[in-house]
Amino acid sequence: MEKNMYDLVIVGGGPAGLSAGIYAMRAAMNAVLVEKGMPGGQVALTKDVENYPGIEEVGGFELCEKFLNHAKRYNLEIRENEVARVEPGVDFHEVVLTDGTRLDTHAVILAAGGSARKLGVPGEMEQYGKGVSYCATCDGFFFRGKTVVVVGGGDTALEDALYLSKICKKVYLVHRREEFRGSRILQQRVFAEPRITLVLSSVLTNIAGNDQGVTGVTVQHVESGETRDIDTDGVFIFVGFRPNNMLVPAGVKMNAAGYVVTDEKCETSLPGIFAVGDLRQKYANQIVLAAADGCVAALAAAHFVEARKAQAGRK
Ligand code: NAP
């Protein structure tokens, strides 16, 4: 079985992981980044990014390419492979890939991000890919000139409702409260968009469809209990996401919502294991914060590895 020894293994290739890779290479670490799919993470699925400082407007995919090319410029090794588990050790940690390869490493940066939360209503799974979607940038095009329902009240729901309103004939925005959680500027744009119809204090209770796809939804008012059917061709669900914490080894402290708890260096409760980006408990999840986490963790990991090596040399 293939065995390798690294200073640092980065698990995940979104902005946090790639930023960690850039900083690790600049710190002359022997680092590898493992990513099971295409590098870029959730941002690659985002249409436009308008809040990355210094870049006024950029496509999500294009921004990911910039991160990736930047990391490649420093010759960061990138393995397209899936991590099966992370085994913490005393002298070094092991990252085991699904093909059996074992990567021995002094430090690990967990950068696996998060994924879309499901609503859990009847019809959601049955119609997934046939009208139910969790990504407007990926699937919006299929609903050109049609009617869609968007569920949620955060930044993603508002941003993607606006995006869909440019493509679709009509967008119903269903939210369970009267107030939106999303930012003021997005709210103002949503209120000003005539193609968006707000359905507030309402929850989706059913998604109806047939072999051809989604045909409608049922919404229920949370106070009156009244239900109402809405004809629609698609349903876009943006009700938050869960951290991808399946690879977080036992012994690493997580909060009740499953986010990894770290110190200011992004180091977890296990020495030499760091967590960054959407996986880490913090005030907000933003690309700029994910990139910042990657920087902090790589600098701290470099320091950790140096100290480890110096200690080993003294033994
Ligand atoms: P979020 O902020 O957690 O919002 C989730 C929304 O879904 C909330 O409005 C919530 O309602 C609603 N919701 C949750 N569970 C629900 C359920 N079972 N039924 C109905 N509604 C439900 O998630 P997000 O919008 O994906 O954003 C995640 C993070 O990314 C945030 O920090 C956000 O600021 C950031 N983000 C930023 C940008 C940007 O700045 N360009 C773009 C996208 C995302 P309640 O409000 O009632 O809880």
Image: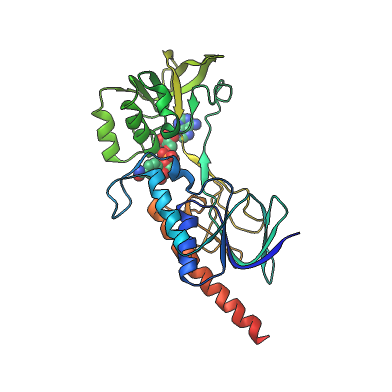
Q: Nearer the viewer, residue 122 or 84?
A: 84
Image point (49%, 67%), residue name: 25
Is there any visible trace of residue 176 in the rendered image? no
- Percent across and percent down for residue 72 are 47, 59
Q: Residue furthest bottom?
A: 314
Q: Is 5 situated above or below 45? A: below
- Percent across and percent down for residue 249 are 65, 56
Q: Is residue 220 left or right of residue 155?
A: right
Q: Is 188 situated above or below 56? A: above
- Percent across and percent down for residue 214 are 49, 17
Q: Is 308 situated above or below 116? A: below
Q: Is 129 situated above or below 242? A: above
Which quadrant would the C terminus be assigned to in this image?
Answer: bottom right
Q: Is residue 198 left or right of residue 259?
A: left
Q: Is residue 140 left or right of residue 276?
A: left
Q: Residue furthest left?
A: 192
Q: How is the image coloured?
A: rainbow
Q: Is residue 20 left or right of residue 148?
A: right
- Percent across and percent down for residue 16 are 47, 55
Q: Nearer the viewer, residue 211 or 110?
A: 211
Is there any visible trace of residue 235 in the rendered image? yes
Instruction: State which image quarter holds ligand 1.
Output: top left
Image point (33%, 51%), residue name: 52
Image point (37%, 33%), residue name: 160
Q: Residue furthest right?
A: 1
Image point (51%, 19%), residue name: 207
